[in-house]
């Protein structure tokens, strides 16, 4: 048995070792953060290829030179909206194949292979990594230190396509909904708000027509933790409408569907919206069907196939879901749905391009109830990826 003196010394030594270990871990964490400063974005050091976002190829003189040499006509005649290297720009949501398809001149496999070989030979330098990450936010979020519940964080950062009219109309509608329901509404375009401390203050985070990759790796991790551990997410239209997503979890799990296109001729069409179940808590008060004009998104597959709770779908016979030679028919064509992600709640509707639709009564009700459910105010909740009834007395206002 250890003497009392030896016992005290042993305990003190172990405590000191623990403090040293903690200090070492903290120092390592700080050092890692310092070494990643300015280069924490997902594609910072990913080798260049034809799948690299066009913006990242254009901002590097070496990769731009390869692009001009291998595909001298690719950028010819394109509007600045696509070729600009200053976000927001379509170059942040297009790759080489996207541009070729936009110009209706798809590239051969051999051409792509040759381009990949030449691009991959270009080194990703520290300067290149910093340039690739310059469109992401770091530093303080400048959000309020505390907010009164129920609380909603409205996030509207855009690196890709910035639809100013839809953004403004969406923000106006959200303010009106918040005022009517007594919610605290906080608005930001700063991706640095996606951190554990700030997110813990909010019942739901609403992505208002966010486009382009907008979160660093640390911000992605914090946002995913927030959702999977019981947070709420709601989004509309452009937040699920990019042609390319670098973050698979966001597109395939949180939204639950990959955008593939929308009609262009005519662009906006009147179509019949079918409510799946007018007695559902989110859709209660909506008619079984209604007709409205919108830019109608199509998706690679129905989110119903991966467990989404479909709220409304389109009657494809009521409009023309094609884009030239591209068939955008889905068969089962959901346009609004909810889903559980871990213990978190996700609501998405593809409605929201035309500013006037945010004041359309049926859309307003759908948005309000969908966001309320995502904020945890419905009669159901999410547990381990499944939607279950709340215990009696749970919120259902």
Image: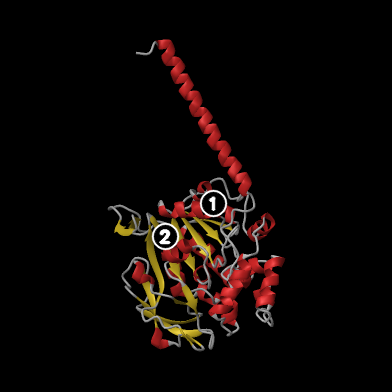
Q: Which percent across, then down, holds residue 303?
A: 38, 70
Q: Determine the secondary structure under disc 2.
A: helix
Mark in front: 1 vs 2: 1
Q: How is the image coloured?
A: secondary structure
Rendered position, 232 above or below 2: below
Residue 177, numbered circle: none
Task: Inspect this view and state whether residue 163 appears.
Answer: no
The residue wearing badge 1 is 218
Q: Which residue is mark 2?
A: 374
Label 2 environment density (alpha carbons within 10 Å; few <14, some 14–19, many ≥20): many
- Picture coordinates of residue 40 (x, y %)? 59, 53
In the rendered image, the vertical position of residue 99 relative to residue 151, given as above or below: below
The picture quadrant where one finds residue 233 is bottom left
Report, in whole angstroms, how far the alpha carbon at label 1 lies from the one at label 2. Answer: 23 Å
Residue 56 horizontal/vertical position (percent):
64, 66
| Quadrant the C terminus occupies | bottom left
Q: Quadrant of residue 93?
A: bottom right
Quadrant for residue 377, please give it.
Answer: bottom left
């Amino acid at each position: 048995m250890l003497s009392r003196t030896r016992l005290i010394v042993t305990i003190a030594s172990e405590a000191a070792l623990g403090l040293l270990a903690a200090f070492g871990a903290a120092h390592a964490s700080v050092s890692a953060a310092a070494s990643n400063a300015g280069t924490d974005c997902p594609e910072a050091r990913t080798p260049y290829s034809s799948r690299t976002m066009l913006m990242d190829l254009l901002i590097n003189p070496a990769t731009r030179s390869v692009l001009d040499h291998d595909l001298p006509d690719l950028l010819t005649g394109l509007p600045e909206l696509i070729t600009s290297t200053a976000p927001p720009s379509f170059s942040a949501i297009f790759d080489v194949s996207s541009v070729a398809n936009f110009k209706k001149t798809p590239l051969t496999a051999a051409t792509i292979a040759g381009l990949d070989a030449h691009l991959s030979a270009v080194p990703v330098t520290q300067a290149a990594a910093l340039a690739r990450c310059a469109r992401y936010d770091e530093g303080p979020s400048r959000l309020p230190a505390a907010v009164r519940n129920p609380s909603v964080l409205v996030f509207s950062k855009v690196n890709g396509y910035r639809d100013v009219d839809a953004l403004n109309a969406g923000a106006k509608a959200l303010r009106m909904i918040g005022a009517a329901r007594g919610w605290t509404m906080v608005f930001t375009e700063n991706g640095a708000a996606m951190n554990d401390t700030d997110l813990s203050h909010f019942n739901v985070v609403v992505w208002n027509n966010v486009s382009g990759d907008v979160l660093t790796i640390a911000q992605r991790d914090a946002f995913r933790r927030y959702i999977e551990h019981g947070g709420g997410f709601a989004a509309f239209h452009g937040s699920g409408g990019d042609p390319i997503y670098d973050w698979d979890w966001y597109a395939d799990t949180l939204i639950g569907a990959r955008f593939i296109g929308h009609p262009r001729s005519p662009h906006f069409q009147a179509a019949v919206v079918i409510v799946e179940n007018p007695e559902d808590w989110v859709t209660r008060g909506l008619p079984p069907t209604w007709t409205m004009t919108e830019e109608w998104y199509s998706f690679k597959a129905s989110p119903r196939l991966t467990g989404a709770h479909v709220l409304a779908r389109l009657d494809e016979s009521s409009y023309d879901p094609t884009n030239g030679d591209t068939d955008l028919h889905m068969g089962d064509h959901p346009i609004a749905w909810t889903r559980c992600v871990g213990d978190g709640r996700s609501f998405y509707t593809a409605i929201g391009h035309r500013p006037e639709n945010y004041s359309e009564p049926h859309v307003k009700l759908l948005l309000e109830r969908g966001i309320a459910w995502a904020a945890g105010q419905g009669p159901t909740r999410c547990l381990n990826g499944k939607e279950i009834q709340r215990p009696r007395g749970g919120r259902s206002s």
